[in-house]
Amino acid sequence: MQRATARLRWTCVECRWRTTRSLTTSSRLRLPSHAEQHRWQLSKDLSRFVDKVLATASVASHHINAYTGTDYTGIDALRQEILQQEQHVKNCHQTAEKAKSNHLEALAKQSAGQKEIVGLLERKASWHPSDLDRYMSLVRSEHVLDQAVQSAKEEVDLAERKLEDARSRLERLERKRYHEEQIWSDTIRRNSTWVTFGLMGVNILLLLAQITISEPYRRRKIVQEVKAALDERTVVEKQPDDVQQMAEESPSELALLSADVGAKDPSTMVDQADPHPADEVVEAAQNASAQSISSPDIPSQSISSQLASRWQDCKDTLQDSFSDRVVQMKKVEVTTAVLQGAMTGVLITGIISLIARSR
């Protein structure tokens, strides 16, 4: 019996431990920290890099805005000040309304006391001792009521002056904000205009560089490639014609030459060869070296000819730009060229005006 009870207790403990372990595992799988541990290291590094880049870009944009005069921080602070001033105007208005209500109450008390005094004086012949006491208390309180009315009136005047000052300051702040926003928007438009002019100038410079540098080189390369292809084609077409012409002109010579070559012995051909070929090779090498030494101006002539050809190409390109040659162009190309010329003139005029203004 005791063994069965102990075994049952152990089974219950084991079941409880397994349940707790499963719950702990399932809750751990659902936790954000567990998912964070399974992220790749590259993803973490990329997230940190992106955060750093965004922070650097924010600081850089702030410095650029401060340098170009397009920083909106001052205008935002001015707007916050306007909101605070509006709340101050509301508080001043409430204070003025309260002072006016106090002044009206003081006037009502004073008028009620004066009416009661007038009523007591009208029936002065039939006064009782209580009426006399009442009259004396009203006479004594009349001075207090006058002071209360005066003080309430002063409070009303002070509250109205504060309200007027707050409203005038609010109007000044709103006008200042409007003026600053106008200046900010004008600065934005001016900077965007100069950036547009700069981009157009860069585009024009790239176009001029392409016309003056890239286009002649490309044209020269195309001409050389076409010329080489034509020369190769001419050589290939000429070789069969030469062979056929030689065969037609001297068939008897070719037959005799082949018969002589077949009749001769290889040993005889070796004996009839030049007995001193090495001396002739040495002499030819010496003549070639002497000729190369005696003519050192060949590289300079090639460099000068290259410079002359480049100068001639540039000159031809410039003359062709102002020649009477008929060119077919699309309407959009003509419009683009005219607009680019106009923008170039505007850019040059703006630069000259800026230089003159700075001086």
Image (cartoon, grey):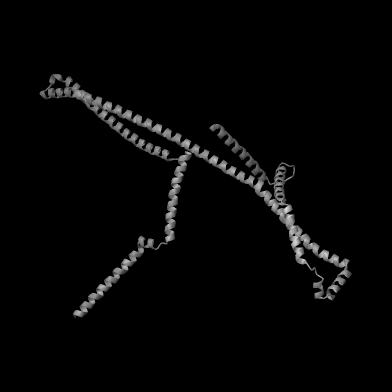
- Horizontal and vertical percent for residue 169? 37, 31
Question: Outermost residue toward the top?
Answer: 125
Residue at screen point 64% across, 40% down: 341
In which image quadrant can residue 245 be found?
A: bottom right
Compared to residue 228, the image places residue 253 above or below, namely below
Quarter of the rendering occupied by the C terminus? top right
Residue 70 appears anywhere in the view? no
**Residue 128 screen position, x and y as percent:** 11, 23
- Residue 276 lies in quadrant: bottom right
159 left or right of 255 in image: left
Q: Nearer the viewer, residue 305 or 149?
A: 305
Along the line of sight, which residue is nearer the eye, 260 or 154? Answer: 260
180 sits to left or right of 344: left
| Quadrant position of the N terminus in the picture | bottom left
Residue appearing at x 45%, y 34% in the figure = 179
Q: Is residue 229 left or right of residue 90?
A: right
